[in-house]
Amino acid sequence: MYFDLSAVETATLVFIGTLAFALVLVLFVAVAAFVALILVGVGRLAWLIVAGTLVRLVHGINDLWDGLVRHASTVELPGDFQAQPSPSTGTYPRVALRDS
């Protein structure tokens, strides 16, 4: 069977062309949406990895600092600190009074 395209009316050809163009647009939007979803997912995964790493880093620093403070609290120094006399004006220690 031979199909003659010239026998089809112009309105039918326009309708079929419009449907074909709409299909192309729908496919383009669907692919763009799928790519956007993939990019959002990759971005979220990257954010979770970075945020988790930063949280672990901060907790590690806090644990190390806590260990250092605990160790420092157990260390005894061999000598006592000697009190150093400070110059005093009598009423207000360590305040230099100027002439008013």
Image (cartoon, rainbow, N blue to C red):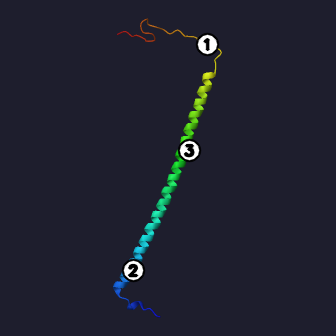
Residue 33 vertical position relative to residue 79 in the rendered view, above or below: below
Number of callouts: 3
Q: Give the mark nearest the N terminus, 3 or 2.
A: 2
Residue 76 vertical position relative to residue 10 in the rendered view, above or below: above
* SS under mark 2: helix
Amino acid type at mark 1 = Asp
Residue identified by numbered label 1: 80
Residue 24 vertical position relative to residue 58 in the rendered view, above or below: below
Residue identified by numbered label 3: 53
Residue 19 coordinates in the image, percent (x, y): 39, 77
Amino acid type at mark 2 = Gly
Give how far apart the Cα atoms at labels 3 and 1 are.
44 Å
Residue 52 coordinates in the image, percent (x, y): 54, 45
Q: Give the residue displayed 52% in from the left and 55% down from the top.
A: 42
Residue 16: quadrant of the picture: bottom left
Q: Give the mark nearest the N terminus, 3 or 1.
A: 3
Q: Which one is in front in this view, the residue at disc 3 or the one at disc 1?
A: 3
Q: Nearer the viewer, residue 45 or 97?
A: 45
User: In the image, which disc is placed on residue 17?
Assistant: 2
